[in-house]
Amino acid sequence: MSLAETEYAVATTGNQRRTRARRLYTGEPHALALDEVRRHRDVLPAASTDGQRDLEVRVLAALAGEFGVHSPQDQGGPFGLVWVGPREDSLIVAAAAAQRERVVRCLLRAAAADSHGASGCEQHKTTGQWIALAGPAGGTLLLPRDHGPALLSARADLSGRPANDPAQEVFWVRTPGGRERASTVLRRIRLFADHDTVDFRTALPEDAELAGPHPELLTRPRRPRVIAVVNSKGGHGCSSLAAGLAQALSGQGHRVLYLLTARGGPGGPGLQGHQWPEADPGLAAVSQEPDRHVLPVPGLGHAFVRCSTLGADGPDEARQLALLLRHPALDRAFSHVVIDASPTGLPRAAASTADLTLVPWRHMPRPPGRDVTEVHLTPQGEVWAWLEGAYRDFENSGPAELEDYAAYEERLDQFVRDHGAQAADDELEDGLVRRLFLHDTDEAGRQRWGTQWDQARDGWIAHLRRKQAAGWDEAAGARVTRTLSDQEWETALRSRVAEASDEVLWDLPIATGRRRPWLVPTTRMPADVLGALRRASAARGLRLSSTVLPDLGNAVGPASRARWEGAARQLADEAHMQLPQ
């Protein structure tokens, strides 16, 4: 036998062995299992995105709530499932004929969008032999075409019913690691086909049981570890951190791919002068043929690819990004991938597919002072405070179109003709508008404040003039200084941390457990202040890195750059410890 024939026989034997192993865990038909084994290196791939995993968690929760304690032999399989087909970006679900409508009803409940409609799981398309159901937050379920009648019947049955979240009906959702384990259980559901009874409402199987008969074949082939540097708002140093991290990992001997998901070159030290290509390939093109688009960075020991994006950042982009990160070409060439996902790139998709998410945090809050000044309003001051709030609402409901604005200006002119000008009041920048506002509000104010209204109304604009001149109007109330208690100070600090962190985490998928993002401070401050911020952040469920990056600002001299690169290397060590081994 020639060498080529020997290699083919070994490969064929290996594929057959892995196919048989896959079928023991999934019950999948032989042809489908063999095709998946040939296409992917994983015998049982895990869900590649948070959206896919969370959809599978809800599916298992719905099935556990529907079937309760049951015998797989009586139901045609565990939870009525004959077989499942796990893929990285989807899951095929095939139910026994007698339980088909019941199972499909659980699938629709799993993706319920609200408390009024039947389901948020929409039929995405019907192609070939599959009916694709797309979840509202990402993730895809595939049904064989012969499940179509059951799908129509289940959808009609659920129409108009209030939808309950099935994930709230099982205990393991609230346990550490429960959600991650649930997706694994559903993808290996045929392991439980021979059990006398199955009940997953209170607990899920342990790792030893999930390993099954061939744990040696389930070891995931080594793939690049993915670090995403994301932010919801520009100006926090996202590109600088990503480029510096890629350079630091490269300096430690790792083979690094720097993936930029937005137009424009990064500003990190060491990459500022690099000549980027003029034409940026789209993410879909790169995910299919990364070996054509990945280019080396001369002298830095790592490579880069820059993907232009069209503004979309949803489940489809997360799926394309996940497929790119698991492409065999990347498996062979790189040990780490650093994604620069600034707000104009793909922050949501990157955060949902990465092993570790870092969020640079430049505008960190300062702890509040211990002494605060409070205002104890007089009855007249309370009326003025109410007027201020009502006036803000009045301004926000102002004219939006040009024709409306012209009519509004004509009304102001008519008001002056009817009531005359008042030089003292109209010296205020918007004094005339405030006089019109008072005229319109007069009846409502009189009904609310009674006898206090006339005096407060007549003195309001004069009060604003004194306030504008940086003088305090004693008629509004007394200013009292007091010292905050420890509990009040902690509450005020947590409020500042919550407001500042929401600025950088807004609209990002905040996962739990190991996949929670790490905030990277980029502002130097005293150790006691930083310690207080860490405690307040931990109380909010946030995690801060131990490394604090110096803010380069406009100082890019040798000393500043050396400090920044040293901090980037320290952060690279810290990040590497958090990655899955």
Image: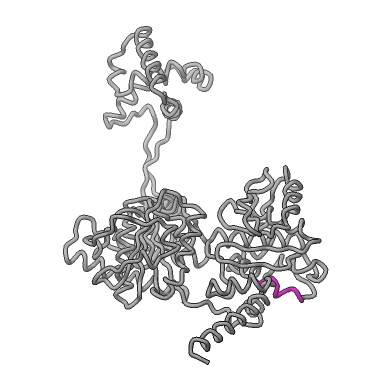
What is the quadrant of residue 103 in the picture? bottom right
x, y percent for residue 347: 42, 55
Q: Nearer the viewer, residue 393 or 153?
A: 153
Q: In this view, does 333 lie above or below 555?
A: below
Is residue 402 at all visible to an observer of this figure? yes
Q: Which of 388 and 278 is in front in this view?
A: 278
Q: Nearer the viewer, residue 318 or 436?
A: 318
x, y percent for residue 307: 37, 57
Q: In the image, 451: left or right of 136?
A: left
Is residue 532 at all visible to an observer of this figure? no
Q: In the image, 106: left or right of 135?
A: right
Q: In the image, 350: left or right of 300?
A: right
Residue drawn at x 42%, y 64% is 289
x, y percent for residue 38: 56, 74
Q: Is residue 206 highlighted in magenta?
A: no
Residue range in magenta is 188-194
Residue drawn at x 76%, y 50% is 153
The number of numbered badges drawn on the structure is 0
Q: Is residue 357 above or below residue 376?
A: below
- Residue sitting farthest toward the front: 1
Q: Is residue 178 above or below residue 464?
A: below
Colour treatment of the image: one colour
x, y percent for residue 424: 28, 17
Residue drawn at x 25%, y 65% is 564
